[in-house]
Image: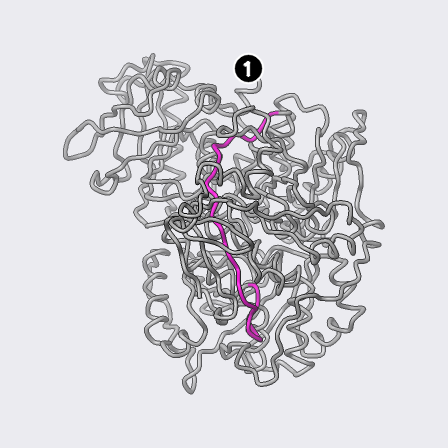
Amino acid sequence: MITVYENGGFYSAGSFLSAEEGVARGFSQASGREKTMAYGIMQAHNTSGNPERLKIRFDAMASHDITYVGIIQTARASGLTEFPLPYVLTNCHNSLCAVGGTINEDDHVFGLSAAKKYGGEFVPAHQAVIHSYMRERYAGCGKMIIGSDSHTRYGAYGTMAIGEGGPELVKQLLNRTYDVDLPPVVGIYLTGAPRPGVGPQDVALAIIEKTFNAGTVKNAVMEFFGPGIANLAMDYRSGIDVMTTETSCLSSIWQTDETVRKSLAIHGRENEYKAISPQEGAYYDRILHVELDKVECMIALPFHPSCAVSIHTFNENLADLLHQVEERTRQQLELKSEPESLLKKIRSGKFYADQGVIAGCSGGTYQNLTKAAEILSGAPLGADAFWLSAYPASMPVMMELSRKGSLASLMASGVSIRSAFCGPCFGAGDVPANGAFSIRHSTRNFPNREGSKPGDGQLSYVALMDARSIAASALNGGAITAASDLPEITADPSWVDYQYDDSAYKARVYFGVGKPQPQEELVFGPNIADWPEQIPMPENLLLEVASAIYDPLTTTDELIPSGETSSYRSNPLRLSEFALSRKDPGYVGRAKAVQAVERKRRTAPASVAAEMGEYDPRTTGLGSVVMSIRPGDGSAREQAASCQRVLGGCANICLDYATKRYRSNVINWGMVPFTVENIEELNIQTGDKLYIPGIRKALEGSDESVTATLIQPAGTREIRLDMKNLPREERDVILAGCLINYYAGK
């Protein structure tokens, strides 16, 4: 199904050669690296003059209503006068305005006022999810787009798109650059055509299962090419592409063809098309050969997209696999009481889900929903526990589904049709009942993404599946069913006829790109607050461990929960109260206690002499630190780091950072991204302390490690903290205390 060639390989005549075969034919790895699609696009946007040290300027940006307020507030504090590039503000996350009183709609009003003042594009609530809108209106061959959402992926349209935390978008607004070393490129060679019933989510989950835990494509660009692409319609390609985020790659890019040209033409942008493909002899650091005709219908079990198996394997091994889910539940959620066994959902040898959802940038596409309607064919879901909802990803998609009759067919089956909304992807929509099991064509199934609160005894589960198999399961009352097992199932066509009608956008979207109105006033709601002051790095640091997490992986959802907390993303102080609330409820209190002593130290050093012990309070600052093994998988949300900083955090310590974007967020918020090779052997625990002498001097220089004293109840010892790959500007941001301070100083 998927074969990984760890030693890399070369592109030749539409196929690939192993590294050994390529060298034997005279190909060179050094020159071959410059022949990939990714290399050409990145260098076309690189302003550094150094092909290995990229300083990228993007063609456009996008944010949604959880992120754009903080970005604009940060840029405004740093001297923003107008948006220097197209900036799209969508409203698809807090669009229900269901939690927190007026504050969600207050953010929307702020966004519209900012689009008017600075010259942006404002997409009102319920018009489109962020990535559908950008695919429809901005993705084009050879472009680069950055978004403050981790699933910013438009590779199928020949666009290299990158999801990052807000500070990286702030840099673009201030005419700065996105700085990154030239990333490795991994070739994804597609052959064959998908079997009937197998959808894009199935292909994506198979790739994620193969790559995530092995780190095969971590911080790399995934470059798709090969004869199998011609067998995939545009929506199908995008459905695979948007899920590349879950492999922990940096970005993606696909070979373009006539299908891309026709799709851009339908959207009125045929001039954005150009043929893009690898050059003869292009070299890839690794190759994945994906045989599309061998991919099966998949299910990703809680609590990660990489926990994927074929639906057939799941149904044949129910007891064992459900036992594994229950073990993960106990370990990851640290439950106070034993949850009800999932084995109770097995009836007559079949496992029954309670809910289905088809939504968002991955699920709510025209092709997916058309296929779901075709499978259901108006058959009733029935009046039992199982229910199904569908969210078309944009108004043009909904209008076309309506025009073709698919929407009416879905509704006739009892499917609940909703407006464009990302909520089911992050725990703010269609929350299941306690103990319920939801099957979703959405992007993630991390803990709490379905809205459960284990600390309050509320727990439910999400598994990821393709829309086709969700519809097939709905036909069987919720019994998990592979769509490929349906007797009348037909293969997805390589071209889906589609009429794009953007009249809804023309009627409601504010198109202000390039037309700033400086006289317009920003409209602030009572919840919109500026970032609190952050101090520069002191000469020395005394850190107290406010949380020690030994899970193999810590997601951004655990660092700052999604769901209802999203309403407070425009208020740093209020949001920080939720930091690690579902993973370590005592963290906020411990961090605040350290912060209170630090505030006293800054005004009256002698008053904290007792708390400081042998360390000089005049030159040594206090702060908290979070220790974890591998933090930052998942969302691009900067608040996973900024909340720690608001509470007085000065560093993270880990074995490795799960994603570049989280590490960048740590740096941009003025915290040191330490790593330790033997971190588990150190047995660092909450309440331990670390004294780091000369940290400011080390950052002012080029030191890649510092010696620290680890202070534990059993005694003290010296350890090495690494801070490798910190270029000068990132060091200066940390020294200044955060990105806002850094720009203010300039």
- Which of the pair 20/725 is nearer the observer? 20
For the point 54% across and 67% down, the residue is 192
Image x and y of residue 599, in percent: 41, 22
Q: Which residues are magenta?
A: 176-200
Residue farthest left in this picture: 714
Q: Can residue 607 be seen by looking at this rendering?
A: no
Query: Is residue 320 highlighted in magenta?
Result: no
* Residue 465, horizontal then vertical, whole percent: 52, 67
Is 580 rendered above or below residue 539?
A: below
Q: Quadrant of the C terminus?
A: top right
Q: Position of residue 462 (x, y in %)?
A: 48, 64
Q: Secondary structure at mark 1?
A: helix
Q: Is residue 197 above or below residue 138?
A: below
Residue under the image location 48 percent in, 59 percent down: 445
Q: Is residue 62 above or below residue 339?
A: above
| Quarter of the view holding residue 530 | top right
Find disc 1 in the rendering and name its residue: 745
Residue 738 in percent (x, y) is at 49, 25
- Residue under the point 44% across and 71% down: 310
Instruction: Identify the residue at horizontal 62%, vertical 78% (top origin).
Output: 490
Residue 614, quarter of picture: top left
